[in-house]
Every structure is written in structure tokens, then in C-alpha cells.
Image (cartoon, rainbow, N blue to C red):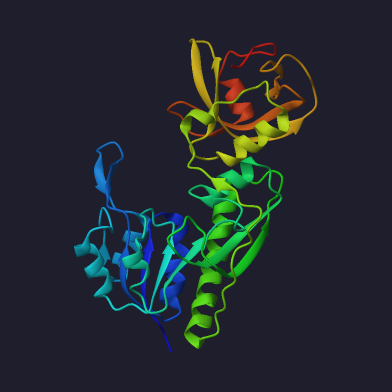
Amino acid sequence: MSLRVVFMGTPDFAVPTLSEIIGQGHEVVAVYSRAPKPAGRGMAEQKTPVHRLAEGFGIPVFTPRTLRDPAAQNAFAALGADVAVVVAYGLILPREVLDAPVLGCLNLHGSLLPRWRGAAPIQRAIMAGDAETGVMVMKMDEGLDTGPVAMVEKIAVAPDMTTQDLHDRMAVLGADLMVRALAALDRGSLAFAPQAADGVTYAAKIDKAEARIDWARPAKEIHDKVRGLSPFPGAWFEADLGKGPERVKVLRTALAGGAGAPGTLLGGDLTVACGGGALRLIEVQRAGAKAMKAADFVNGTAIEPGAVFS
């Protein structure tokens, strides 16, 4: 047997799930994704990763700006879906949409709910130094990631894992989890349990203003911020590299020995003093340039030990 599915997703994170659902033989009758946006040097409109995949399989794609108007809701209901699968879609689903599929709307969420409800669960888990996170299949309701949970796959977060590392692993595990959930749903054996009332935290959308590094903070805290914001938007600092102040993104770091005034470059290996301990910069990126290893960065600049980053 197979289910009649409407898939709703937008970024790369959602692509493996759509691919697996198609591969398992379910009938994907339509895909919903965010509308194309201008991007690149020519600012040509670019379709989302999910949009492109769906078109490759000949699946109709809808890109409404909102699902709150009756016309959009009626069009969704007319698809006659058994279930909607939602993965990082980006639009709020009103009650009329949530109620349209016979078996409801399932969401793949990247945290161990109720921890990190909201827009940026992967980044916030790493920035908080969480040692464990996971992916969950949840039945959606009108709240913010408050619905009952059916299945979970836990993931250990290694001390040096970045958001990109964790994102890529979660995307694959989440796809497998969702197709297993759909198989159970098809058999009538998918059971849901309410989320715990305790331990609720919210993963607010990343604000670019919080990406600047404050070297007065402890090294471990800065390390977690760097990996949580890598690769986007990228934690950054300013330094005079020979032509005045310049912004530099930091993409990978490691805890290191040493001490000094916060922001002071302690050695040629790009070890920087923090408010507590020190941090070695492993991979950085100058404005307008590609990411580079620390040694290449040092060789291409005029900085020397004793320089102060701000």
C-alpha cells in the first residue's frame, strides 16, 4: 500500500525526506515550497532545492505567499491528501490546512522536543553546548512545535561538530525516520505521545547582530558560538590586516592553552586569548574570499603575535 502525500518543504534539509518518500512508492500528489527569490550576481529568481527536486520528478509545485486565504486553503483541500509531510517549509499552517489531510500533518523537527521549539533548533543546540540532540516526527497542531510526538532518533553532538556537520547528518537520519513513520501510519500503527511539560526552550531565529565574537567571553562559549553559526551567518571579528579594519568570519576553532588580554593574538597559529582560556582559529574567511586554513590566512596578512582582534 502507499499513501497519497502532499510534501511541504523548502531548503536542502528537506530534500532527502522528499527523495525517500518518492523512493518508497508513496504518491506525492503535490509539493509546496517557498516562492523563488532573486539570488546571485544577476539576481535572477532561483527556485528552492525542494522545488527543483519536485520538478525533476514531474510533481506539481505550489508556491503560495500565504496559506491563510480561502482560495489557497480550498486548493490544498482539493488535493485529497491522506497526509501532509512538512520539513522546514517556512509558512504557518492554519487550522483549515492542518485539518484537510485525512491522517493529519506530520512534521520532521530537528531537536528533542520540547527542547528547542522554533526556527533554529540545530544552531541553538550547538550554541548552547548540548551534548545530544535528535530528529522527531510530530503531528502538527496550531502551536509552535507543540504537537504530540510519534518517533525519535537521538544524535550525539561531538565537541567540534558544526551546524553544517549536524545538519547534514540530521537530514539523512530524518528522512529515514519519516518514511518509517509513514509506513507505520499506513499500517494504522503510528502512535503519538504528548510532549513533556518540563524542559521547554525556544530556538529563536538567528539574528546577524549576535554573530560578532566577544573575546571577553570564555573560550568554550565562543567555540560553541563559532560552530553553531558555521557556515551561516558565520561568527566574526574585526582586525587590521594591513589595510585598516576588516571583518573576518571564523568557521572552525579548537580550545587551546594560553592566556592574555581578550582578543590578543598569542601565536602564529592563530591562537587568540579569551576572557577565560584561549581559542585556536582553524578555518577563517575574509570578506569576498573563500574559506581558508589558518596558515594560509597568516601568510596572506601582516598580522603578528600581539595584534588585537575586536
| Position of residue 295 measured from the top left corner of the image (x, y, whole percent) | 64, 27
Query: In which quadrant of the rendered image does the C terminus lie?
Result: top right
| Position of residue 179 measured from the top left corner of the image (x, y, whole percent) | 50, 75
In the picture as drawn, the residue positioned furthest to the bottom comes out as 1
In the picture as drawn, the residue positioned furthest to the front comes out as 197
Query: In which quadrant of the rendered image does the N terminus lie?
Result: bottom left
Q: Is residue 249 above or below residue 191?
A: above
Q: Residue at x 76, y 24 (%)?
A: 276
Q: Is residue 276 above or below residue 132?
A: above
123, 83: nearer the viewer:
83
| Position of residue 252 measured from the top left corner of the image (x, y, whole percent) | 62, 36
Q: Is residue 137 above or below residue 259?
A: below
Residue 88: image quadrant is: bottom left
Report the label total.
0
Q: Residue at x 46, y 65 (%)?
A: 140
| Position of residue 97 measured from the top left corner of the image (x, y, whole percent) | 33, 67
In the picture as drawn, the residue positioned furthest to the left comes out as 71
Q: Residue at x 24, y 75 (%)?
A: 78
Q: Residue at x 51, y 71 (%)?
A: 178
Q: Is residue 195 above or below residue 100?
A: above
